[in-house]
Image: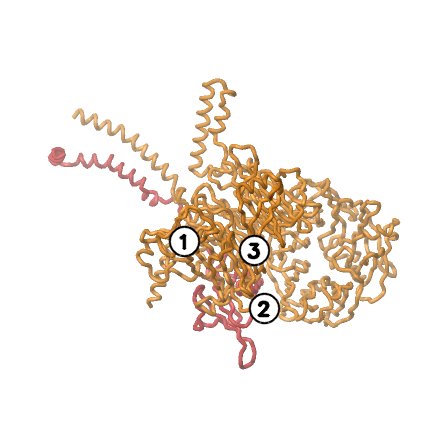
Amino acid sequence: MVAGRSLGRAALSAALLLGGLAFGLFPDEAGRIDWYRAQIGVPDRLLAHAHNGTTGIYATTEQGVLAAVDADSGELRWRQLLGEHIGALQLRGGRVLTQSGANESRVRVWDAHSGSLQWEFVQPPPARRAAGGAAAFVGDSEDVVAVAGDSLVRLAPGRAVPVWELRLNSTGTYRRLVVHGSSAFAVGERADGGGLRVVEAELASGRLQKQYDIADGVALGTGHTLVLDAGAHGVYVLWREAKSIVWQIHKLGLTRPLWDMYHAKLLQEELAPEDMLTSTLAELDSDSGSSTGTPRFALTYTKDRARKTVVIELIATSDRMDMRKLTVFRSDGAVVGGSAMPGARGAAVAVRTSGATWSVHGDGARAAKGEFAYAEAAHGPVVRAALYRTAAGSTRVLVQTGGGLLAALGPDSSEPLWVRDEALAHATDMAFLDLPPPASAAEHAAKATDPAVVTSAAARYLLRWAATARELGAWTAAGFGLLEQRDKAAHAAAATTGDHFGFHKLAIFGTRTGVVTALGTQGGARVWARYLAVDGASVAIEHVFVTRRCQPLGDAPPVVVVVGRGAQNATVVAALDALTGAPLADGRLRPLPFGHARAFVLPAVGDDGQQLVGLATDGAEPRLEVWPPTAAATQAFCAAATPFFFELGDGTGSMRVRGYRAECPAAAGTSLTTTRAWTFDLPEGEALVGAARYDGAQSTALLGRVLGDRSVLYKYINPHLGTLAAQRAGRGGVAVYLFDRVSGRLLHSAQHAAARVSAAHPFLATQTENRIVYQLWHDEIPGAAPARGYVTVVADLFESDRADVRDERAEFSSLDLRLPSVVMAAFVAPEPATALGTTRTASHITTRDVVFALSSGKLLAIPDPLLDPRRPVGALSADEQAEGLVPYMASLPLDPRRVLSHGHRVAGVRRVVSAPAHLESTSLVGAYGLDLFFTRASPSGTFDQLSPSFSKLNLVVTTLALAAGCLLGGPMVRRRLVARAWA
Amino acid sequence: MHVAQLATDAQVVVNGGEQRGLIQSDGRFAVDNLRLGDSLLEIASTNYAFPKIHVRIAISEEDGQAAVAARYVQLGSKWSEETPVLAYPLQIGASAKYDFFTPRQGFSIITMFSNPYMLMVGASLVAVFVLPKLQANMDPEALKELQAKS
């Protein structure tokens, strides 16, 4: 009973605290202070489908997303996050069929209009290795056949078990499935890698009809094989074996015969054998089951350095199928694609990045061509093209670029009809750039009234007054919230100018697709984009560093440096103007002669005011390379920042973290040798599963924590603090180590015996000031077994466990450390999370919220007092009340008013970032992963702004009423005084 | 709440993401290959709160079949055996719809007049208009007495 009462008091106190702190979002602020972008990722499969008068584009992506996009506007209609590889996609009559999963195979049928799941079948993991994946509708019926796990199955809606199942016995990896007549054909690569295997099953019973091998040494999807459905005439496989100069054709279901297709006969052109070896095939109908009976394909070859593409039709003659050449066109430098529209006649579309043109071939009278406006430098070359027609019959060309842009083109306009920039779904790093504040009217006036320009003193006087009046008008407008609109309008014209409150910055992203993109944090408009490639291959960007900020009094542009990897893992570094994206060097990227293991900003500045970047190589003798690679930069670094320490080996699976000390070269050079400073060996049987460090530079406003009795508990602030999580292999459990990254010294460790880290349960952590917050899945929550769930652990580090005791030394050194006193508490998290972050404000006076990116798509901000590890269990003492502590409760609440993303589903968040605004109360918070979301948060409320409930109308009315009272009352009082004087 | 109101991408999450299931258009869902023992089942939805469910799968000693016992659980508390077992197959309804917003206060005469500024204005008007009238209605002798005192 007592426990019940104290729990009730704790709940009441927490509710009061939350009620006091929670300011929530006003409905009219949604979409005004935040923005959201739902993305799908770079597609690996695209199909168009028309149903009930509307056309949709259906895509599967590398990130395991199935999505439907409006074909006319490019807007996302719906998406499903399957989170696993999608192996098959087919559309029929308003239904979408997918097969997904590598181990556990799932076959699902979706409603094409709404994206709702109609029915599904799950095949448990096979005893032996997975056998590919494919799926196809059975004619116009509701049934489907699929390769699921290691079986060929026929499925029907409403049935939990297959109609029939044919074991494939791990004979191959089957990735094509065609239903023809009374048979289902599965085509795949043989298990021994020797070529293709065909399995024919009777559609009604699932009985094995035939099983045989074709196409020695050939794999599916390589440009050397093709499956063509000729309707009533059968299904054919085309292939060319390695070093063979003829194409071979086989009709599925017949073990023999095969026949050959000679280039000379087909192309009506003599080819040398080496020319024949260049020929490749491309599908023109992406959905083989929708062919009209005379399927078409494209054959591309090179002769005399000229590339040509031939559109060929498979036709039935009196005794057998034959090939007919329909058209031939030059395809130098073009990406050749085909029809993505089931039922459409196969035609080839050739899209050339150089010149930005497209043309359709083999479509008779409906052949078309056009140009398009396109910035290759921003999005990369076109890598995929497809053709479809809208419900109204208009020709559309869909192009996909190496950078991840998806654009729909039409013949009537060079401007794309719509674009979707999916590069940001692959963002790997991001940095904020503060923008220079807008020049005030007074500053403009000061320039305009320069005596050298305006000689008349009277004119200058009048101009200054006019400027002051304009400024006054602007600030009056600001008082009524009009300034924000004015600022928005101004930003549309000058996106690289900041605002008065520091809300508008540039968020510069680096992506795995090679694109660097800068977005404005207010509204999310793209300011610039740059595609980075070396020798035709995109650079997988890993790091984005702002190495020179905007300089109010200088002309030097701000600089962003991106570090990535090109081909063969070679390091590529590029410096860009952070306001325009223009390369600062000659613009041509070259790979560096090494591959980096770690990249970081060095604590030194070069002659040009740019912060230097360090690239550490791994191996037996790691080196530290300074970028820019000049002797002057290295000297500047050596003069300013040595000795310099860094660590390597904290990746997943590592059992030893190594610390190195960089040694400056005796002679001029850009490379520093290193000596091993320390090693941090994990206990035997443990391997790293996660690591964390401070996200950017840290600062603190309060050195200690003031307790209820006015004594101070001093914070242990170590800028070199690192966190490691290691999992024990045998007996399980996770150990978390806090260590110093310069000395390698262990500062604290915590054991979580029932915790487990896996791909589904990642280790998440965020470090700020003297606090580390991390989250671990627990198979048994300590003290509450058998309860399971995510546990959030908070550790606060103090200089001593006694108040008013502090380290009095004036300088901090990692080489002479004292151990911290650690206060820890654990809480049960409300939902699974995918990323953690902490809000940041300008002076760090405001309390910090920890932002949880939940897997349900919410960004939940948990206030600082609820994560305080000093929350006492039970009733509060007078000192604890005076300190403002909240009684401990095991669970962290999911308060919807603390959900920053409100109704948006921010999916697949990999990182939560934050930057301070100029207002101390306000922090910019962003989340990126599959989706993007940016907003403003005020963890302690908007204490430096007028209360949201403050009525400016009331103030004006009151002032006017007072003025009116004075005006009306004044004469009356004067009359009365005069009357009294005469009385 | 009808299942049609639930976003089509809502998912059933078991053991924090170890297994996931999708919800069909008729509201049915299935999660396969759950391990024996205790599991936590949650519905991941953006707009609706759902109760959390403890699922215990055990092999019956009598017939060797797997038996499922599901119970509602409270986050942060022990999973009690005394909680009533839910009917199987499970039927789960949303416990609440999230309200993410704080309503903004509209214009109100009462709020306006309870504003300190308005109270000041009111007091000033009373001082200007009402006090002289009170003074005029006072007994002249009492008035003189007051003036003499001041």
Give the chain of mark 3.
A
Q: Secondary structure at mark 3?
A: strand
Structural crowding at the residue carrying mark 1, measured as other residues with C-alpha within 10 Å and reported as few (<14), some (14–19) or many (≥20): many
Residue A377: image location, x then y, percent: 66, 41
Q: Nearer the viewer, residue A327 or A222?
A: A222
Quarter containing the C terminus of chain B: top left
Callout 2 touching callout 3 (CB < 8 Å): no
Numbered marks: total:
3
Residue A819: image location, x then y, percent: 44, 56
Structural crowding at the residue carrying mark 3, measured as other residues with C-alpha within 10 Å and reported as few (<14), some (14–19) or many (≥20): some
Q: On the image, numbered disc 2 is attached to which residue?
A: B32
Q: On the image, numbered disc 1 is attached to which residue?
A: A799
Find the distance from the CA under tag 2 to the CA under tag 1.
Answer: 51 Å
Q: On the image, numbered disc 3 is attached to which residue?
A: A658
Name the kind of residue labelled 1 in the image: Glu
Find the distance from the CA under tag 3 to the CA under tag 1.
Answer: 26 Å
Residue A168: image location, x then y, percent: 72, 70
The label on residue A855 is: none
